[in-house]
Image (cartoon, rainbow, N blue to C red):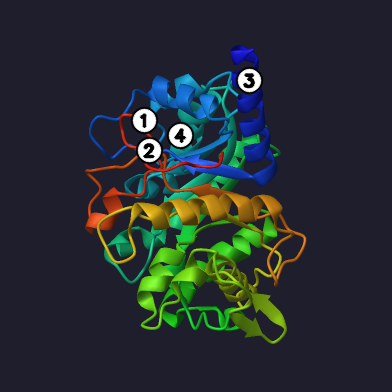
Amino acid sequence: MASKLILLGLLMNLLVFTDAQVGVCNGRVGDGLPSEQDVVTFYRSNGITRMRIYDPNQATLRALQGTNIELILDVPNDVLQSLNDQNAANTWVRNNIQNFPGVRFRYIAVGNEVDPNNESRRFANFVLSAMRNLHGAIRAAGLGNQIKVSTATYTGLIVNSFPPSNGAFNDNVRGFIEPIIRFLAANNLPVLANIYPYFGYLGDPNGNLPYALFTAPGTVVNDNGRLYSNLFTAMLDAHYAAQARVGGENVEIVVSESGWQSAGGRAAIVENAGTYNNNLIKYVKSTTGSPRKPGRTIETYIFAMFDENRKPGAETEKHFGLFSPNRQPKYQVNF
């Protein structure tokens, strides 16, 4: 009887994640993390069927072969320049995709949060060319119907996001992002966007914590009849509004990262992290889309599976994990 109950629980987990279009990001910038094989086994035991990794880690790709886990595979920013050569892009696809026929590649994220306004600006001129070359290489390999090429952008490129319909890309990033959005639109490809209500909450001097945690009792923002009761959806629709202004009205957004820290800063506590991530899972499972895009599934990836103590930046960056590196949950997650 016990074994049957365990099996039933795993099947229920699988159904929740499949229906919800929810994945979990697998960062590895930390000490004491499980092996790549053990991480993949841990995903499967928790019924998590989508993963994002931030470089073509060969051990992870080997461990994923033959599983049902769908994958976002990142091209690291410091590799982008080399992929401005088509032959190099062909080789990258052969080495990291074609050599792993048992892996269910879903998206290739060509760069992560490249921004002409910060230290990543040195990569900005290489993103679109690398996307084009990798898209061409994937099509030439006969995988164009299976794998979609994109890049992972983030809310830092957007200004005037309140109300959401005012969302627009900053003038000094428009020359960078507009050609990318138009390329995605022309090729029926999605944009990947990292959306963090935690940072939206911190950036608002009158921050409304229940609005950020999905716990507001009702409508907080009425944007000309579009009603918002949570900051996640408002930020998502600000992204949609921004891309519509540069030719991307019909470009779907996949939320490639979202999460809440459990330590290290204001409102970064275990209770809030558990509330946010559980409510996020529940929301994207049950929602019928956003006010701007009703009826559209919101495919979302939680950041991250484990705490990463070697992440650079603020202390909060080290505490996004659903689990500690020893695989102990920091709070109950309703998988």
Residue type, numbered disc 4: Trp
Quadrant for residue 253, please give it.
bottom right
Residue type, numbered disc 1: Arg
- Tag 1 or tag 3, which sits nearer the N-term? 3
The answer to whether residue 136 is left or right of residue 274 is right
Quadrant showing the N terminus: top right
Query: What secondary structure is marked by label 3?
Result: helix
Quadrant showing the C terminus: top right
Residue at image point 25% right, 48% down: 311
Marks 4 and 1 close (CB-CB < 8 Å): no
- Tag 4 or tag 3, which sits nearer the N-term? 3
Task: Measure the alpha-carbon separation of dots 2 and 1.
Answer: 5 Å
User: Residue beneath label 2, please?
Assistant: 323
Quadrant for residue 266, please give it.
bottom left
Residue type, numbered disc 3: Leu
**Disc sitting over residue 327 in the figure:** 1
| Percent x, y of residue 166 | 58, 84
Q: In this view of the protein, which residue sits in the foreground, 94 or 193?
A: 193
- Tag 1 or tag 4, which sits nearer the N-term? 4
Marks 2 and 1 close (CB-CB < 8 Å): yes
Task: Measure the alpha-carbon separation of dots 3 and 1.
Answer: 22 Å
Task: Measure the alpha-carbon separation of dots 4 and 2.
Answer: 32 Å
| Percent x, y of residue 16 | 65, 39
Task: Measure the alpha-carbon separation of dots 2 and 3.
Answer: 23 Å
Q: Mark 4 or mark 1: which is in front?
A: 1
Residue at the outermost bottom position: 224
